[in-house]
Image: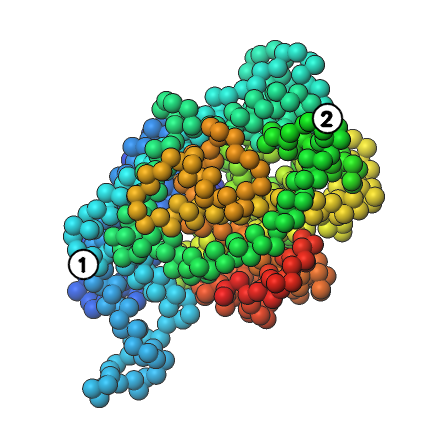
Amino acid sequence: MNIFFEKYNTPHQAFPFDRVKLEDYEPAMRRGMDEENKEMERLINNPEPPTFSNTIEAMERSGELLGEVTEIFFNLTSAETNDEMDELAEKMSPILSDHANNIMLNPKLFQRVEAVYEQYKRDGCHENPDYSETSGNPVTPPPPLSIEERQLLNDTYLGFVRSGANLPQDKRDRLKEIGNAMSRLDIQFSQNKLKEINAFTLHITDPADLDGLPATAIDAARQAAKDKKKDGWLITLHHPSMSPFLTYSTRRQLRKQLWMAYNTICTHPGKHNNTEVVRRIVDLCREEAQILGYKCYADFVLEERMAKNRQAVYKLLHQLIDAYKPTALKELEEVQRHAREIEGNDFELQPWDVAYYTNKLQEKLYNINSEMLRPYLELSKVKQGVFNLATRLYGITFKLNKDIPAYHPDVDVYEVFDHDGTFLALLYCDFHPREGKKAGAWMTSFRGQSIDDDGTNHRPHVSLVMNFTKPTDTQPALLTLGEVETFLHEFGHSLHEIFSQCKYEELSGTNVYWDFVELPSQFMENYCIEKDFLATFARHYETGEPMPDTLIDRIAASRNFCVAMACMRQVSFCLLDMAYYTLDHPLTDDIETFEQNAWKEAAITPHIPGTCMSVQFSHIMAGGYSAGYYSYKWAEVLDADAFSLFKQNGIFDRKTAQSFRDNILSRGATEHPMTLYRRFRGAEPTIDALLKRNGIETPGTQGTNTTA
């Protein structure tokens, strides 16, 4: 029996990952498409006049089986894939894309949606029962809609329009072709990157080449070699392996080899080269936007974002360049100067040197580095600290349930309960890298939140996926402070899902504007260096001794160390993203050259020929952030402004946290995000709090509203 066709006999109807087989997916997808097609046929052929209930709501509730199987399958192709899964993804993605396009480009279906939209479009008709058209003829108003229902109606109508439902047939056909091609290219881009990362290892056999590496990095490299049945030590391109090597290794040539390997992935001749994939993705996005009547893809995307237009995005980016670049150049100059103090006046700092000498400078200025902190940041203690933070802020609790099946032995599943004992969510925690798992960190859901008409509240099943330093056979998983920050970031996304209280899944949880979705996640990062938070869990994994106050003080003092360099790095990525998606003509430039020209305003280090970010920039090519990478900096303005209220009232203040939960975390996309933010904060955000937090003093940018 296909597992997707059964009723799950598991706690909270959790998906039985332990029973799913590869051969279950395709038949379930095909049956799901058939069922949804039949639902659409019944909807279209309904003899009753179109109403919100029989059209908009019916559409939102449709496709249950297809939604479930695709949610499970495509989440696993990111977290636990193999060649057979990848092949099936390549096969089914264009078929699924075609299916979705056939619905969104169906003229009869659009007619019903449009009819409902027009009923409610007349100003005040849903509020004023005495409404009459200008002709004087009385009009019977449709039943009034709630705020959330009006939002769903508006989003559904715009979804059809923005998919091209009101265009001529030839243009609709071309949009279908573009959608199918994009689904294949997204998968190809991601698979190429993962295979290139997995293909490289730096195999060390001479112990002298481990010079400078901390014991944790050496132990992890030894374990990696052991797992591959090799002697010596293995360094990989996965972040927990690569980052310590670039930061601590005294072997400059090996640092260069590793840095170049990572920064040239998907550039080499052969089937994993992503250069033409990038070109095709960018060109197809531009063509899609122009078919829909926009000058460029960014104009199309930003219409449904807080920023609204590219002028607002560039305004923010240039504010950041003006405010941070002078400081960034000074920071880099200081790193260069310190490197020459160590190596001699002829030493020229190269990109593979930056992490190494930046760390040396940090040690000199603050007597601190990430390795000093690792013994106090054992993963199980960090996890408990993060969970306890949520308990302290919101009263929720987490209970490990080993009876709930997971998709890999590394994954733990927690039940999340509200302060009154009410079940809120399942939380899957997947912390360590493996070959079938993409690099990076993300939050996703196996099931979204929604409320039936009978009041049944379907709670979300949320997954935290990260690539933290693995435990070895001699010590547990010990994290860097940066990894703790990543944990908090993704946990913030999970709280956005966990607290959702929306009627419609389409509007629930993190289904919000992309330049708003990073607010809950980046807000949580603020706690990473708060002394009162660290004191709750940071204890030495061997002795149990708490992290010394003097060490915590040095962490706080070093908070803004090279903060401007980090800002310029992010802004350069934002500029690259915008450069691609503001194109109004085919991309004919050499990709490497285009990239360098795109971010030159923010660049502070020289370009190394042959390296290229674009061909591995998953966020903007295959991750949904196309024309949206600026969202991280946009949301950083929001999170700094929001956390300043917590700093004012107390970082654990329950009343402020409850307001954040009620007005932002639980509301999803039921209202415009700025409406939600103003309700929480009492005003729109400015860049002031961010500049203050980062210690940047630039009088010309004070009080600048991000929405201007």
Q: Is residue 571 above or below residue 112?
A: above
Residue 444 seen in the current view = no
Q: Is residue 460 left or right of residue 203?
A: left
Give the spatial CA distance, label 2 vs label 1.
Answer: 72 Å
- Which residue position is annotated with label 1? 108
Q: Is residue 494 left or right of residue 67?
A: right
The numbered mark, 2 or 1, whose residue comes first in the sequence reads: 1
Q: Nearer the viewer, residue 279 or 591?
A: 591
Quadrant in the picture for the N terminus: top left
Residue 655 seen in the current view = yes
Residue 343's mark?
2
Q: Is residue 108 above or below residue 260?
A: below
Please tell me which residue is depicted at 58% across the width and 70% down the height of the picture.
683
**Which image quadrant is residue 60 in?**
bottom left
Q: Is residue 86 above or below residue 507?
A: above
Residue 485, image x and y in percent?
64, 44
Please tell me which residue is depicted at 27% across the width and 73% down the height of the picture.
119
* Residue extending furthest toward the bottom: 136
